[in-house]
Image (cartoon, helix red, strand yellow):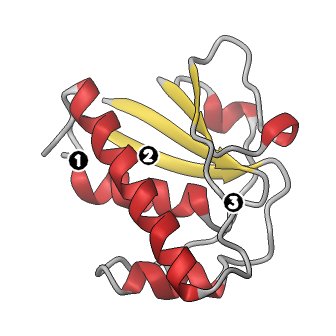
Amino acid sequence: MKTVIFACVHNAGRSQMAAAFFNALTSPEKARALSAGTQPGERIHPEVQSAMSEVGIDLSTARPRRLTDELARGAFLLVTMGCGDACPYVPGLARDDWPLEDPKGKPVERVREIRDEVRARVVRLLEREGWTS
């Protein structure tokens, strides 16, 4: 089984959405996703929780966590979320960057657009790797 890590700075928005979509759309025998951040926030952004609940994904128990060497060990891919120079880097781990706007504090309509873009990118990744369920 392959592990993909979705990472951003606070692990409270984009990376949480990506990991949740990934795990909902793939077979757990093929791959799994984790999310983490370099400076984890206190909680998932409420606007992100709300937008995800609209599509049937509950993030109420999700918690931001730090990206550690231990967490990254053995991962297949690190996908960063457009955080520029603040994005994490793990030596030896393949990396992709998705230039996505941070949903924090955005109007619900914009958060929905970001959510839908995250989902579309996850679907493309799953199709590319042959991990669709």
Residue linked to disc 1: 26
What residue is at 34 percent from the left and 35 percent from the top?
125
Corner quadrant of residue 45: bottom right
Q: Residues within 10 Å of mark 3 (few under 14, many from 20)?
A: many
Q: Earlier in the sequence, mark 1 or mark 3?
A: 3
Residue linked to disc 2: 33
Q: Earlier in the sequence, mark 3 or mark 2?
A: 3
Q: Residues within 10 Å of mark 1 (few under 14, many from 20)?
A: many
What residue is at 57 percent from the left and 40 percent from the top?
98
Q: Position of residue 28 (x, y in %)?
A: 24, 46
Tag count in the figure? 3
- Disc 1 and disc 3: Cα gap in Å? 21 Å
Residue linked to disc 3: 11
Residue 14 in view (yes/no): yes
CB within 8 Å, label 1 to label 2: yes
Tell which of 122 and 109 is nearer to you: 109
Looking at the picture, which amino acid does disc 1 mark? Thr
Q: Position of residue 130 (x, y in %)?
A: 19, 28
- 99 lies above or below 76: below
